[in-house]
Amino acid sequence: GEPLLRIEDLRTHFFTDEGVVKAVDGMDLTVPSGKTVCVVGESGCGKSITARSILQLVDQPGRIVGGAVYWRSGTRPWTDLATLDATGEEIRQIRGDEIGMVFQEPMASLSPMYTVGAQLSETLRLHRGLNKAEAREKGIELLRRVGIPRPERRFDSYSFQLSGGMCQRVMIAIALSCDPALLIADEPTTALDVTTQARIIDLLKNLQEQNGMAMVFITHDLGVVAEIADEVTVMYLGTVAEHGTVDEIFGNPKHPYTRALLSSIPTMRGVRSGGSARQRLTAIRGMVPHPQNRPTGCPFHTRCELAIPGTCDTEAPPVARFDSAGHLAYCHLFTEPAERRELHTQATP
Ligand code: SF4
Ligand code: MG
């Protein structure tokens, strides 16, 4: 599909008493209409901050200090969301109307003071101009669509009367209530048990296919990525390490970080056929550096087995492109003279 969202060189920094934390520092992300793009990386790599930056939901002392978040949908021409007033009417309309969002903690996202039906109705009345009776009818229909049993009854329940999985279904119903062109899901299943996780993933996958909406799905779980992604962006320390189709990322990974991530989980063939394969527990050596001490050169050089001394620790890696479908990686290995590249590729695990 045509791109709906184009994040270019996004920089979101946090101005703390201890100094500037560059949580997102040069992030690119393109989301084609109707496709699911997974953003994957270890915790603390800036995935959530990227997601929150799209809708100007970054908390103080964070601030977008550079780059652009281009968005278009329906009759809306390209609009840089990063330039909109964070508390203004326009971004408020885009949140919910055009872009829906589901977060990690469903319980915390719902108010315990009002019934789930009241919270769902509020969105429907506000964004769609329905009256009370219409909102109730539409709300019950949405609860049914997200797989909530006896939705007429659940409409009048409070969040604390529901399980975590049911609360997440309610949050998904609220996010879908305005037929958004894009759904951003930030680790929507992380707080749930494994069985519920699988059900919610299936639900999101089905809804995405039925509605033809695009999805940005943020996760640290490569099994989920294999199941749900059309395209994958691998993030490391606030920036892109590698991007490609799901088949390229799993079948033909290029960046040493992607390769390390993949070798730290059961083989993808195993994951894709239900996880029966032998588990290879090769953890990535070293720790993710704190974004406050972002390494110079390639941000991964402090942990990379293939780092080229004198180059990777000083020079920002250039982009290498591998196909016309957008497979790319930021790494010095691919722009090296052929004979040295040969050597490094052989040394790759
Ligand atoms: Fe490793 Fe160098 Fe490539 Fe970074 S640029 S991933 S340090 S080889
Ligand atoms: Mg997160």
Image (spheres, helix red, strand yellow):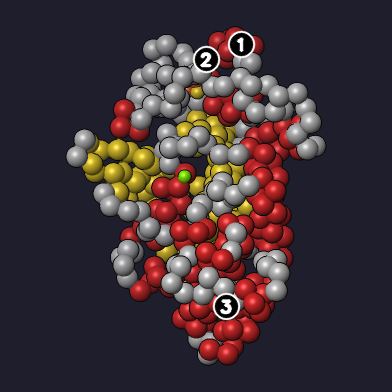
The residue type indicated by label 2 comes to Glu
In the image shown, does 161 or 135 lie closer to the viewer? 161
Q: Residues within 10 Å of mark 2 (few under 14, many from 20)?
A: some
* Mark 3 vs 1: CB contact within 8 A: no
The residue type indicated by label 1 comes to Ala
In the image shown, does 256 or 327 lie closer to the viewer? 256
Frontmost of labels 1 and 2 is 2
| Residue 335 seen in this snapshot | no
Q: Report which residue position mark 3 lands on.
A: 156
Measured as percent of width and height from the top left, residue 179 is found at: 59, 71
Measured as percent of width and height from the top left, residue 20 is found at: 25, 38
Q: Report which residue position mark 2 lands on.
A: 305
* Mark 1 vs 2: CB contact within 8 A: yes
Is the C-beta of the residue carrying label 2 under 8 Å from the nearest atom of ligand 1?
Answer: yes
Frontmost of labels 2 and 3 is 3
Mark 2 or 3, nearer chain start: 3
Mark 2 to mark 3: distance in Å? 56 Å
